[in-house]
Image (tube, grey):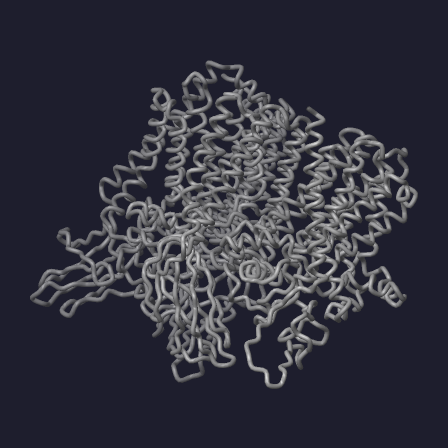
């Protein structure tokens, strides 16, 4: 039994004798049991037969009460109001109650469509009420008739409560366990410092998330749709989600194929547990901040072999204005998720190229590279492009080392593992990119140079809530804070001055690595500027045009720029006493102080001036927004897309039509002598299959004029048909490979740690005592 | 060593070859690219083009906007403004800068209150300006690279100390912090910026086409009526930007270069003077950094656009250092006689930059001399002071003598302005206590407050010294600190609205003195400069009196107090100012005379008349009136011609400068002979 296992056993023995621990566990269990029992009990369904109508010719618009003074106990309810309306999006169904406490009722609304017959959205009620009202708000000149109202109780409140109880119980028991451990063995100073500092950093970086509602970032609505897509995919049995079932307008959107949503499974699970959309997102975003800080600490502390520098670099990285602005204010979720893994990739590259003078990379270097690249591939494609560029530059800078077999094979191994881990995503992505004529393949005409930054924007320190994201005309006035801040640039300048003054003449591997990072960071900053001739490069040919256009904006390079600048700053921290003598510590303190002040100043201004939205479910943001529609098939007119019914050709009739997300069943009859068709409300991506349910024979499908699914029916056909999305076999094979690789990595990690500890028993003891 | 020589040789060779190639192209003639009255254009290759617009027949009140546009080109490949042609203006021309090939460039016309059918005659010519610009940039780039290589060699060979390097890089950082709002492709229009831009542009036109030098009346102001700005506001330091305009650099670029060079001058002069007085790099660095980054400086530069005042501030340390050295250094030392040159250069430069700052400087010098009258009338010092005055006056005669003559012979608008009440325009206590100053604007109370603050670092240091310095042991450092403390304190009080300026105004003899400065907050300029000296000596005092880590903490805090508010203010200016892109001045009009200080009293900016030998009567609207004798028939030519007195003043200045230069060269030759 190693040291860790012994200590664990001792702590457990003490815990079972600890009264507070027993009480906490008992309370947690009792409360959890209560929730579980409540979940197992049957839920109520309330039906109200009141109807309401509004015929045209009466006064314009206004609110119509459908049902008033509804009595409900606390819970999550689905509001299903039957209706018929003659105009799309001219009415919306909402719930209100003037008597519950503020925050006691969380409800948005559901928009009414001509081809839908019922609403179905969720409300959260935290206080019993007798005065709940369901009403409809109508626009001018449309007709509405409402039918029975059904309010279906769900288990959402109790699953949500159960989650909260278990989380709180885990936190309290964890705290008690730690205090027991502290009494027995005394936690290391390092561990306490790291935990405390990282907690503060995560809290500071999450300030805008710790409020009611979320910032109305430009990209956030899109990513809310992505989260709901994963959630809807899971409930409809589609795993992994390939086609978003309810988006746009239930037509199905291939966003998950092109924009990997692996990590979005976490907020999706929170949604399934009953949490509102914004709360799920906030919890997830705090988790992302924590993961970013944790991985950054891990990476930089290993690079510089100093946990204090790891803390400083992690703070600089997590609190960088660029990251906070893009991830938290704008809601660029993909970019924010990709930024979690950049320090890990940097660590991997460092371990491969710079850690050992004996030309043998560190044993885990390939693992860091694999996890880092896999993380970036599966979060943000554009960051992946830039990451590949960065890797190529590092390989060129260390071209001599590449020729070393151990180095080459480590890189190869890491890359291969990354590809295999990502195969479940890459195969469908490549498949669709090559075989589906999607809009993103036609974007080479987009010019990006005008979206570049001014040099002055790189030096922002006191950034305020911006209002201008296009700088070419208006200049820097009220511009978005896309710079990397004067603090990091000052670190780069300081490093370059040391280099220029001949202070970096030592041949150490770390110094060389820092030099490569500094030069690369400077180049990336240059790439992000308006003065870099992107338009001229695009004019060189179709390949550069396509590649450059896909970046969308030049300041995408700032993400990697920040990571490299933090590494350079870490190097300056590491050499502070050498270069600055006794003032070195003041230098570090000053930098960290400014970083915190700058971040807090910005977030404070955002909180004061940025509008916030409370979005509880997808209905509130509608189902039509697809941003630039990059993954629509070329030629699709999204204005024509709406909730729709099947449209048969002349001799064809459709009955018993049921659409459940991407799954359609219906009875079709073709009385004509020629082939007929039925246009279904589904965008036709590769993977849809249609069958005759009785014979099992496949039916032909093709595109209609708006790239929707057209089912071709032979002459005189009559029978039940079924349409569903089926992932191709090779996609499934890719998923299996990725799963196997993941399991292998887990087993490898466990086995390797065990083998290492057996060979180095003193290491674990030193680790527990905070010496490593 | 051989390697180093090769490095420089290679650079020199490359630069020479490229320079020769460009030099040949610099003198090429204008090449007509297009000339007709249609709107169709052909392809334009990169270069600088001059567009001539002639034959405009606009009705009264009509205006024509002309611009060169292109629908598809790489980002900002075409840089130029729409220019305005006014009724009565027969022809004009403007430059357009093309950075990449334009495939479908064409002219666009915008008629206002005029018939759209009367398209003027336009010709587009490719000039050699592009080659000239490239040559200048090549020489500049080569010079910078060479300088950096040389500097590096000196560092590596140990000729530059660590503190010297820190000073250099810190000041460079300070310059870039102050220049942050201009790290872009545009500039910011302050209150007076348009006036100074027109000064530069019209100076350029007068140098190219004018008929007198030094220039006193600039012909092209006020719809070609002319304006006597040069007679009252010296153009000496604007010659450099005017030459840049003659070479062909765009106007906005020239403005930014002028600001940048002023910042560099500010930093270098302040550091040099403080180092001369203290002998300590860190002391000089602290003082010069705090003066460079003071909020009032940045406010002057960007929000007010007060180029003259800001330039004058750069030279004030010379004057202060000169007086300090003359009064404190050993009169027997060999260097003593050279100290007067600080006063000479400082006061001369201030006179050539900004009259009001010069007035303040002269008064301060007189007060200084009276306060320290014992040393003033010390033989050695008195001789130096008299010599200084004896050099300043003739060298600058070309400017001050004609100016005083004009002021004595006519009443100008500034005479009336100088009698206005000024007390309400002083700064409030709340201004001084702003830690993070904003861009500011038309302030009401403290709302939208302007950055009228000498610097938090200075105020904090003053407070520290007040608490601990007065009680500390007496020595030279403490004594100097006290004196500069007193100067800062008194001037600060004078700059506030609490000082009874309006009461003093009524005292005979003091009226002009009390109102000439127009805004009491102008006294912040000398406050900041004296403050820089105070900070430098404060550092030395602290070095002796305060224990190690407390002193280091205080200094670090002072540096932070200096830099962080400056970064905040620079950020605020950068991120809250509208972008102005100006490549030529044709669309700026000609009437940006601000308050029209140099117009004759009673005349408006639309027409006026100046006293001169060729005209002997003032017309109805201050127009120039010529009396035509009965029966006269012939051609009359009217031009501005300097009076004999002015020509004599020019001659005195020229002779003085030549004598000084000759004397300097002669002395240098003598010294070399002696050393051999």
Picture quarter with the C terminus of chain B: top right
* Residue sitting nearer the eye, B653 or A362: B653
Q: Answer with the quarter of the image where residue B43 lies.
A: bottom left
- Location of residue A343 with respect to B57 vertically, above or below: above
Residue at point 46%, 78% (across, down): B58
* Residue sitting nearer the eye, B641 or A147: B641
**Is residue A228 at least partly visible in the picture?**
no
Side of A686 relative to B67 (left or right): left
Percent coordinates x, y for residue B527 in the rendering: 78, 50
Percent coordinates x, y for residue B484 in the rendering: 83, 44
Percent coordinates x, y for residue A196 in the rendering: 61, 35
Residue at point 56%, 26% (across, down): A502
Side of B399 relative to A541 (left or right): right
**Is residue A486 at least partly visible in the picture?**
yes
Side of A159 relative to B398 (left or right): left
* Residue sitting nearer the eye, B50 or B110: B50
- Location of residue B240 with respect to B621 vertically, above or below: above
* Residue sitting nearer the eye, B375 or B516: B375
Residue that lies at the very extreme toward the right in this rendered image: B374
């Amino acid at each position: 039994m190693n040291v860790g296992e012994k200590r664990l056993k001792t702590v457990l023995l003490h815990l079972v004798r600890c009264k507070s621990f027993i009480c906490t566990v008992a309370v947690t269990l009792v409360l959890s049991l209560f929730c579980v029992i409540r979940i197992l009990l049957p839920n109520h369904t309330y039906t109200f037969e009141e109807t309401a109508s509004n015929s045209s010719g009466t006064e314009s618009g206004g609110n119509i009460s459908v049902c008033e003074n509804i009595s409900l106990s606390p819970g999550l309810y689905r509001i299903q109001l039957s209706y018929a309306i003659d105009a799309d999006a001219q009415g919306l169904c909402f719930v209100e109650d003037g008597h519950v406490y503020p925050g006691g009722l969380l409800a948005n609304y559901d928009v009414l469509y001509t081809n839908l017959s019922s609403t179905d959205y969720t409300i959260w009620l935290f206080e019993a009420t007798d005065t709940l009202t369901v009403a409809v708000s109508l626009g001018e000149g449309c007709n509405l008739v409402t039918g029975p109202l059904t309010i279906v109780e769900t288990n959402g409140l109790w699953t949500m409560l159960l989650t909260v109880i278990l989380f709180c119980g885990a936190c309290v028991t964890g705290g008690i366990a730690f205090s027991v451990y502290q009494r027995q063995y005394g936690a290391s100073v390092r561990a306490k410092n790291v935990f405390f500092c990282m907690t503060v950093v995560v809290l500071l970086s999450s300030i805008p998330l710790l409020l009611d509602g979320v910032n109305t970032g430009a990209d956030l609505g899109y990513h809310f749709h992505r989260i709901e897509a994963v959630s809807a995919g899971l409930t409809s049995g589609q795993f992994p989600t390939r086609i978003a079932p309810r988006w746009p307008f239930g037509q199905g959107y291939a966003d998950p194929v092109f924009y990997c949503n692996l990590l979005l499974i976490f907020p999706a699970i929170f949604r399934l547990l009953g949490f509102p959309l914004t709360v799920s997102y906030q919890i997830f975003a705090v988790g992302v901040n924590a993961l970013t800080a944790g991985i950054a600490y891990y990476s930089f502390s290993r690079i510089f072999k100093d946990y204090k520098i790891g803390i400083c670099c992690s703070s600089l990285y997590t609190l960088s204005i660029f990251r906070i602005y893009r991830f938290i204010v704008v809601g660029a979720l993909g970019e924010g998720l990709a930024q979690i893994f950049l320090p890990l990739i940097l660590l991997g590259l460092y371990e491969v190229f710079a850690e050992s003078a004996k030309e043998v990379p560190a044993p885990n270097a390939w693992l860091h590279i694999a996890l880092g690249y896999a993380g970036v591939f599966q979060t943000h494609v554009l960051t992946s492009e830039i990451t590949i560029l960065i890797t190529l530059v590092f390989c060129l800078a260390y071209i001599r080392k590449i020729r070393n077999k151990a180095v080459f094979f480590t890189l190869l191994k890491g890359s291969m593992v990354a590809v295999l881990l990502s195969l479940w995503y890459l195969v469908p992505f490549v498949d669709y990119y090559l075989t589906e004529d999607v809009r993103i393949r036609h974007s080479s005409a987009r010019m990006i140079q005008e979206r570049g930054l001014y040099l002055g924007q790189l030096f922002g320190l006191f950034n305020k809530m911006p209002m201008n994201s296009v700088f070419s005309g208006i200049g820097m006035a009220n511009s978005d804070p896309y710079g990397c801040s004067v603090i990091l640039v000052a670190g780069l300048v300081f490093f370059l001055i040391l280099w220029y003054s001949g202070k970096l003449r030592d041949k150490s591997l770390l110094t060389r690595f820092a030099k490569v990072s500094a030069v690369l960071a400077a180049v990336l900053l240059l790439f992000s500027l308006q003065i870099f001739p992107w338009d001229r490069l695009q004019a060189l040919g179709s390949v550069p045009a396509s590649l450059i256009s896909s970046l969308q904006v030049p300041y995408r390079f700032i993400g990697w720029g920040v990571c490299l600048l933090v590494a350079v700053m870490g190097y300056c921290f590491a050499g502070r006493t050498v270069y600055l003598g006794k003032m070195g510590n003041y230098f570090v303190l000053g930098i960290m102080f400014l970083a915190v002040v700058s971040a807090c100043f910005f977030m404070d201004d955002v909180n004061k001036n940025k509008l916030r939205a409370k979005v509880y479910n997808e209905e509130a943001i509608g189902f039509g927004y697809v941003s630039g529609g990059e993954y629509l098939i070329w030629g699709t007119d999204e204005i024509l897309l709406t909730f729709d019914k099947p449209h048969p050709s002349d001799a064809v009739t459709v009955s018993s039509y049921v659409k459940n997300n991407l799954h359609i069943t219906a009875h079709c009859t073709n009385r004509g002598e020629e082939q007929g068709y039925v246009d279904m409300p589904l965008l036709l991506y590769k993977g849809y299959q249609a069958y005759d349910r009785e014979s099992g024979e496949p039916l032909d499908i093709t595109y209609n004029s708006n790239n929707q699914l057209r089912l071709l029916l032979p002459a005189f056909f009559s029978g039940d048909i079924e349409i569903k999305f089926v992932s191709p076999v090779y996609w499934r094979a890719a998923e299996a490979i990725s799963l196997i690789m993941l399991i292998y990595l887990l087993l490898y990690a466990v086995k390797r740690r065990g083998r290492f500890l057996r060979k180095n028993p003193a290491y674990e003891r030193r680790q527990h005592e905070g010496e490593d | 060593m051989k390697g180093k020589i090769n490095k420089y040789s290679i650079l020199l060779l490359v630069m020479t070859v490229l320079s020769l190639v460009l030099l040949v192209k610099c003198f090429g003639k204008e090449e007509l690219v297009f000339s007709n009255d249609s709107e169709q254009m052909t392809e334009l290759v990169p270069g600088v083009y001059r567009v001539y617009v002639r034959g405009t027949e606009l009705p009264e009140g009509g205006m024509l906007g002309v611009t060169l546009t292109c629908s598809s080109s790489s980002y900002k490949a075409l840089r130029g403004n729409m220019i305005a042609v006014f009724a009565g203006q027969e022809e004009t021309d403007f430059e357009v800068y093309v950075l990449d090939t334009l495939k479908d460039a064409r002219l666009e016309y915008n008629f206002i209150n005029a018939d759209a059918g009367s398209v003027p005659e336009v010709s587009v010519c490719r000039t050699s300006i592009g080659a000239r610009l490239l040559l200048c940039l090549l020489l500049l780039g080569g010079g910078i690279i060479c300088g950096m290589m040389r500097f590096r060699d000196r560092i590596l060979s140990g000729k530059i100390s660590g503190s010297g390097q820190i000073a250099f890089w810190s000041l460079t950082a300070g310059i870039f912090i102050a220049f942050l709002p201009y790290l872009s492709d545009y500039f910011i229009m302050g209150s007076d910026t348009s006036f100074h831009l027109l000064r530069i542009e019209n100076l350029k036109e007068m140098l190219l086409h004018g008929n007198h030098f030094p220039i006193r009346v600039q012909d092209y102001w006020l719809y070609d009526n002319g304006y006597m700005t040069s007679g009252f506001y010296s153009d000496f330091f604007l010659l450099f930007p005017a030459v840049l305009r003659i070479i062909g650099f765009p106007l906005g670029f020239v403005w930014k270069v002028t600001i940048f060079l002023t910042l560099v001058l500010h930093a270098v002069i302040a550091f040099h003077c403080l180092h001369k007085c203290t002998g300590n790099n860190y002391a000089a660095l602290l003082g010069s950094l705090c003066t460079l980054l003071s909020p009032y400086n940045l406010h002057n530069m960007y929000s007010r656009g007060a180029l003259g005042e800001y330039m004058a501030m750069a030279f004030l340390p010379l004057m202060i250092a000169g007086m300090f050295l003359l009064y404190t250094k050993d009169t027997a030392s060999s260097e003593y006689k050279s100290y007067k040159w600080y006063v000479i250069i400082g006061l001369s430069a201030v006179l050539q930059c900004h009259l009001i700052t010069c007035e303040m400087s002269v008064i301060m010098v007189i007060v200084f001399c009276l306060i320290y009258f014992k040393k003033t009338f010390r033989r050695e010092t008195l001789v130096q002071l008299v010599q200084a005055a004896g050099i300043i006056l003739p060298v600058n005669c070309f400017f001050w003598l004609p100016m005083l003559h004009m002021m004595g012979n006519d009443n100008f608008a500034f005479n009336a302005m100088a009698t206005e009440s000024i007390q309400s325009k002083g700064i409030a206590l709340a201004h001084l206590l702003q830690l993070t100053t904003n861009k500011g604007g038309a302030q009401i109370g403290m709302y939208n407050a302007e950055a009228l603050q000498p610097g938090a670092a200075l105020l904090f240091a003053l407070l520290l010294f007040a608490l601990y310095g007065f009680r500390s042991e007496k020595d030279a450092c403490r004594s100097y600190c006290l004196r500069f403390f007193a100067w800062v304190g008194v001037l600060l009080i004078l700059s506030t609205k609490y000082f009874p300026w309006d009461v003093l105004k009524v005292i005979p003899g003091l009226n002009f003195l009390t109102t000439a400065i127009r805004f009491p907050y102008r006294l912040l300029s000398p406050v900041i400069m004296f403050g820089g000296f105070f900070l430098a000596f404060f550092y030395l005092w602290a070095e002796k009196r305060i224990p190690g880590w407390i002193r280091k903490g205080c200094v670090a805090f002072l540096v932070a107090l200096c830099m962080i508010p400056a970064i905040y203010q620079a950020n605020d200016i950068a991120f809250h100012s509208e972008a102005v892109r100006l490549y030529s001045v044709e669309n700026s009009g000609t009437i940006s005379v601000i308050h029209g200080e140099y117009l004759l009293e009673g005349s408006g900016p639309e027409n006026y008349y100046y006293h001169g030998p060729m005209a002997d009567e003032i017309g109805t609207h201050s127009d120039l009136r010529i009396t035509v004798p009965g029966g006269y028939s012939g051609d009359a030519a009217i031009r501005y011609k300097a009076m004999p007195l002015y020509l004599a003043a020019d001659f005195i200045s020229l002779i003085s400068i030549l004598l000084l230069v000759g004397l300097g060269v002669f002395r240098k030759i003598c010294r070399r002979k002696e050393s051999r």
